[in-house]
Amino acid sequence: MSPKPYDAILLASFGGPEGQDDVIPFLRNVTRGRGIPDERLEEVATHYRANGGVSPINAQNRALKAALEAELAVQSIDIPVYWGNRNWDPFIQSTLEEMYEKGHRRVLMLSTSAYSGYSSCRQYREDAGVALRASGLEGKLEVDKVRQYFNTPGFIEPSVDGLKAAIADVRQQLAETGNPDGRITVVFATHSIPTSDAEAAGPKDKSYLDGVFPVSEWKATDLYSAQHLAVAEEIMSRVPEAAGLEHTLVFQSRSGAPHVPWLEPDINDAFEEYKKDGVAGVIVMPIGFVSDHMEVVWDLDTEAKDTAAELGLAFHRAPTAGTHPAFVSGLVELIKERLGTSTERVAATTCGAWFDVCRPECCVKVMRDGTTKPTIAAVDAEVKAPAL
Ligand SMILES: CC1=C(CCC(=O)O)c2cc3nc(cc4[nH]c(cc5[nH]c(cc1n2)c(C)c5CCC(=O)O)c(CCC(=O)O)c4C)C(CCC(=O)O)=C3C
Ligand SMILES: [Fe+2]
């Protein structure tokens, strides 16, 4: 897409509760209209309750916002960063209203979500589309979106550092238990999603992917999984110490009704299989996430770690990108790309730079009433940019 003089950045994220009283209202916001059983909500509430009702995600987003502001200042790029969430205060709609009141007219949205898919990409486009419509700012405030960045060097590099440290740690753990040559599996972990969402990920007409991520390169699976597999392979190839280690992609944090199929295997079930196969240690690489939020500290550092301990597997969980300097400067590169001050569209992996503007019916989700929600940042977006 041709560059534009954006006048503000919207850091868009998931949001999380900030105290015990927020937990249930937050979970209701997340699951509204999605058929998540009450028992699952009660179960997830206990993860937040154990942490004082506070999700780590908001502090992590405040830190990311500060790190982006600092890097923009170092590079003398004069553009303010605002923050808004899908599920908790400050909500995307109130942030967009504030931005408009302060005089901004061309906003570039940057989300804390790296891959294609409904929850990861399209739902952020809907959040903005719905907010513009509900606030009456449709046609008055332009909101575009930074491309999905799973396969940018800035997203990959923190995991390269993390994998190196993890291998050293697990080797040490195994040596201490008298098994220095024990088999290690590198387990790349991401959020499970319904298989129907995985199949709908990316442009509906897959021929749009020719020259970006041709179907011939991800024949065996869906686009969401294929993007993760490409990232996993790229990380493995950048770590010489990982040569000879096996690696897999697993899924975590499944919700939804039991009869609805979600991507598998679950990380805990996978650990049992590895144990049976003679694996001695696991390295968990949480590549599906951008910060060490609740899905990481609970589902991986608590549940999966416990499973590993019960099975007698050595365990190490690598950090997410967080505020790693390579990640922060990589995000600034993506902003510069859209401002037109950097012309290089960087991409790592066999997959090329993703779309700035989504192709028709990308990651489409039809609601229960048969309609789709208003979106931005797509060739078929319902909410049009104003003629400025
Ligand atoms: C792909 C994906 C990402 C990764 C990409 C991205 O980062 O965007 C992600 C991130 C996150 N998911 C999070 C939390 C939750 N996700 C839930 C439910 C769901 N997630 C889904 C998918 C994803 N989720 C889906 C298909 C559902 C079913 C309901 C629905 O279709 O919406 C529920 C409901 C209860 C439950 O069943 O778990 C909660 C509480 C938090 C915040 C953590 C914190 O508070 O620190 C974060 C960053
Ligand atoms: Fe989630």
Image (cartoon, grey):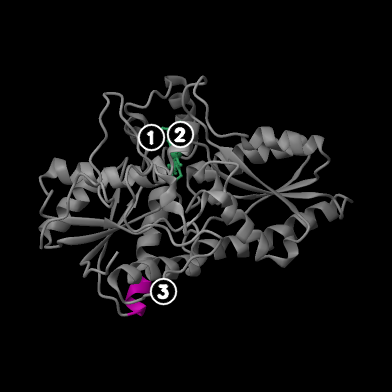
The answer to whether 73 is drawn above or below residue 212 in the figure is: below
- Magenta includes 357? no
Which residue is drawn at the image coordinates 27% and 52% (left, top)?
377
Amino acid type indicated by mark 3: Glu
Q: Residues within 10 Å of mark 3 (few under 14, many from 20)?
A: few
Residue 64: name its quadrant. Answer: bottom left
> Label 3 vs label 2: CA separation?
45 Å
Q: Residues within 10 Å of mark 1 (few under 14, many from 20)?
A: some
Q: Quadrant of ligand 2?
A: top left
Residue named by callout 1: 20
| Badge 2 vs badge 1, beta-carbon distance below 8 Å | yes
Q: Secondary structure at mark 3?
A: loop
Residue named by callout 2: 49
Residue 317 location (% of width, % of height): 63, 50
**Label tally:** 3
The segment highlighted magenta reads 70-75
Amino acid type indicated by mark 1: Gln
Residue 325 location (% of width, % of height): 48, 69
